[in-house]
């Protein structure tokens, strides 16, 4: 049966090539998608072909591309390879797009994920010309059933002058009822409190809305999300997870957490999955999650009964786990809720619920400033994503990383972070495979000593301690946060010059 049961919109079904004609050079184009799920699969490739044709004929072609978060090679990849993106926001993870950004061919606006929708509403990014949004179905009354992500789709549909819909039958039709799309956002000074008091509370609608008169094309597809296999947890990941879970036990004993903890947030990656694995083997019961992304580990926790419910904005599953979820989707109803990312990442909700946030980092310096986004201070990896939304507003926040990278050539604990996404004021707990540093209530020098002792690899520990001692000795009137400015970034300089810090 057709997934398009609205007569008005079913009359607008065309090919991806025909839909792409509605997008021209210089347009601001917003697309659905978040962490490789729920992104349009066909129209981006058609836009890329259009760009190549224009370039071959000596004409310019480039669009500004907005999404919810990262997408996939079929979107970011093909457009970057066709040199079709002049500006990108707010988050990406594609190698071709990353190369285009770091070469200076594509401007990149790396903003907090909770900010992107509201800043678009404020008009900070300019007028939105076209939205391309993937859905699972279109109902007879024109309402849209989202699929595996919500992200910023609601905002894109509201703001765009023209809308292209992709209806993807790979998404189970049973997705209807899994979503909570909040339509109560307002611009200041008309804003109201977000009445969200527990992770699974519904405050919105199960459907996306669109003005049918704005829909210029509907494209039918049957294509899977970008489902990536997770590496088995290595010994370092298991050690990080073990330190973190032991710390949660300590907080319960200290009467700072209830036995069922508080709602969990976990960033994307193998360490996050390892933490979920340790929780699965732990004594904790009745867990909840208020997060951005549902990975394999969270589904496992739901399946074994440890995790009662999870609120997120998207999935990010391995191919095997995605196939299993699609086949058994009905069994997850009532236990999974997908929201817009402005709600899944909303500072007000995160702070009210008391979220426990777990996010990765590239490096941290001895005072707890965290770099989540850049290599050697200049080259973007992916972006800040939602880590800032959660870290600054969480009840507890953890930043996790291996203590070394590149076979020991790089230390993840450095004298001074080469780029700072999260200042020392926002960092509570650092964890590496070496140990855990609880920084709450500590002065800068006390933080530094704990980070060096607990988190740095032994290969770098003495050098970090020596740097701190000399910084204190050589700054008699600057001992609050002492640095040797001539040496602060010398480790990064050593790596660039010699291949090792």
Image: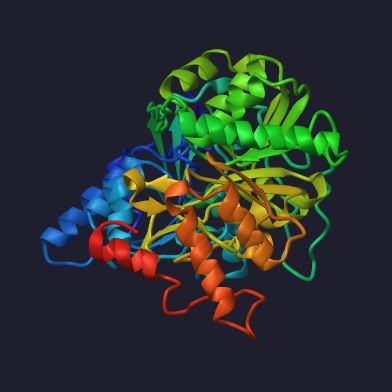
- The residue located at (55%, 32%) in the rendering is 239
Left or right of residue 499: residue 387? right
Q: Is residue 345 visible?
A: yes
| Image position, residue 452 (x, y; %) | 56, 55
Residue positioned most to the right: 255
Q: Which color scheme is applied?
A: rainbow
Residue positioned most to the bottom: 477
- The residue located at (50%, 15%) in the rendering is 324
| Image position, residue 316 (x, y; %) | 50, 33
Q: Is residue 64 above or below residue 352?
A: below
Q: Is residue 236 above or below residue 43?
A: above
Give the quadrant of residue 199: top right
Give the quadrant of residue 232: top left
Q: Is residue 1 above or below residue 239?
A: above
Quarter occupied by the C terminus:
bottom left
Q: Looking at this view, is 229 or 154 the one in front?
A: 229
Left or right of residue 20: residue 9? right
Q: Looking at this view, is 285 or 214 the one in front?
A: 285
| Image position, residue 374 (x, y; %) | 42, 59
Left or right of residue 229: residue 256? right
| Image position, residue 364 (x, y; %) | 52, 57
Q: Is residue 216 visible?
A: no
Count of numbered labels shown in the rendering:
0
- The residue located at (69%, 32%) in the rendering is 246
Q: Looking at this view, is 439 or 39 the one in front?
A: 439
């Amino acid at each position: 049966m057709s997934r398009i049961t609205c007569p008005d919109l079913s009359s607008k079904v065309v090919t991806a090539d025909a839909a792409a004609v509605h997008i021209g050079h210089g347009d601001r184009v917003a697309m659905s998608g978040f962490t490789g799920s729920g992104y349009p699969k066909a129209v981006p490739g058609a836009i890329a072909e259009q760009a190549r044709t224009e370039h071959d004929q000596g004409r310019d072609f480039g669009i500004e591309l907005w999404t919810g978060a990262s997408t996939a090679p079929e979107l970011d990849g093909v457009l970057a390879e066709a040199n079709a993106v002049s500006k990108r926001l707010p988050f990406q993870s594609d190698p071709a797009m990353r190369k285009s950004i770091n070469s200076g061919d594509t401007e990149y606006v790396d903003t907090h994920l909770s900010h992107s929708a509201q800043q678009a509403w404020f008009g900070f990014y300019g007028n939105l010309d076209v939205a391309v949004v993937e859905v699972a179905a279109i109902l007879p009354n024109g309402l849209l059933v989202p699929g595996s992500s919500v992200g910023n789709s609601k905002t894109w549909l509201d703001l765009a002058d023209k809308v292209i819909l992709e209806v993807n039958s790979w998404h189970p039709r049973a997705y209807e009822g899994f979503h909570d799309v909040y339509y109560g956002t307002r611009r200041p000074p008309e804003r109201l409190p977000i009445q969200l008091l527990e992770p699974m509370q519904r405050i919105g609608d199960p459907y996306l809305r669109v003005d049918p008169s704005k829909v210029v094309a509907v494209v039918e597809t049957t294509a899977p999300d970008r489902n990536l296999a997770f590496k088995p947890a290595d010994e370092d990941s298991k050690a990080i997870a073990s330190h973190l879970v032991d710390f949660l036990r300590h907080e319960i004993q200290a009467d700072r957490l209830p036995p069922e903890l508080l709602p969990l947030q976990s960033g994307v990656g193998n360490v996050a999955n390892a933490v979920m694995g340790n929780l699965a083997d732990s004594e904790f019961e009745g867990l909840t999650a208020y997060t951005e992304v549902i990975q394999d580990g969270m589904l496992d926790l739901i399946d074994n009964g440890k995790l009662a419910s999870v609120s997120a904005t998207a999935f990010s599953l391995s191919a095997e786990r995605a196939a299993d979820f699609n086949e058994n989707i009905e069994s997850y109803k009532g236990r999974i809720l997908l929201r817009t990312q402005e709600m899944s990442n909303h500072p007000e909700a995160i702070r009210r619920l008391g979220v426990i946030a777990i996010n990765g980092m590239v490096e941290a310096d001895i005072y707890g400033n965290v770099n989540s986004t850049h290599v050697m201070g200049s080259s973007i990896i992916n972006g800040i994503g939602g880590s800032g939304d959660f870290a600054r507003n969480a009840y507890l926040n953890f930043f996790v990383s291996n203590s070394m990278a590149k076979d020991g050539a790089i230390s993840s604990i450095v004298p001074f972070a080469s780029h700072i996404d999260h200042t020392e004021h926002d960092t509570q707990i650092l964890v590496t495979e070496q140990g855990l540093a609880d920084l709450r209530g500590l002065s800068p020098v006390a933080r530094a000593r704990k980070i060096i002792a607990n988190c740095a690899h032994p290969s770098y520990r003495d050098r970090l301690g020596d740097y701190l001692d000399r910084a204190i000795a050589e700054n008699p009137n600057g001992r609050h946060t002492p640095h040797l400015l001539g040496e602060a970034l010398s480790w990064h300089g050593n790596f660039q010059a010699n291949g090792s810090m």
